[in-house]
Amino acid sequence: MNTLTRIALLGATSSLLAACGGGGFLNRERPDEFAVQRQAPLVVPPDFNLTPPAAGAPRPAEGTAAEQTLEALFGGPADRSAVETSALDRAGAAEPGIRSSVGSEDTNTVAKGTVTRDIIAAPEGDGGTAQAVIPG
């Protein structure tokens, strides 16, 4: 073995053995994760300013659970920003039969390649007769 290799191996071995010892730079003060302090219990304020519901009065929460969930997640209807309003104004109203005219053979489109064409031209069905071909 080369002398440099022996010195490097001896240094690495001694570093590993020193790390196993109890003293040194690896034995530092750590917080005790099991020393948990007890805190005072939560106290409910005595005055809520709530009145009990009247008999026969409608419940304050209106709507179904799904509507309440959507309201909580996304909020109510929001005003559109100036940018969104401008983009919608420039786009104009959609034509009533736009979906039919887009699927027409007379509509000019950009060629997306043979894979896209094969996917679009695939027959409808449950996929029971589908097969994958990996070009070789």
Image (cartoon, helix red, strand yellow):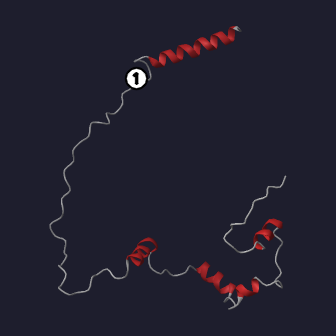
**SS assignment at label 1:** loop
The image shows residue 22 at horizontal and vertical percentages of 40, 18
Up/down of 82 relative to 6, above or below: below
**56 and 50: which is toward the camera:** 56
Residue 114 falls in which quadrant of the image? bottom right
The residue positioned 82% from the left and 83% from the top of the image is 105
**Label 1 packing within 10 angstroms: few (<14), some (14-19), many (20+):** few
x%, y% of residue 84? Answer: 60, 79
Residue 60, image x and y in percent? 28, 81
Camera-nearest residue between 80 and 128: 128
Which of 63/119 is in front?
A: 119
Amino acid type, mark 1: Asn
The residue lying furthest to the front in this view is: 129
Is residue 129 shown above or below 90? above
* x 64%, y 83%: residue: 88
- Residue that mark 1 sits on: 27
Query: Of all residues shown, which one is farthest toward the bottom?
Result: 96
In the picture, residue 28 is in which quadrant? top left
Q: Which residue is drawn at 68% across and 66% down?
A: 128
Instruction: Give x and y (percent) for residue 92.
Output: 68, 88
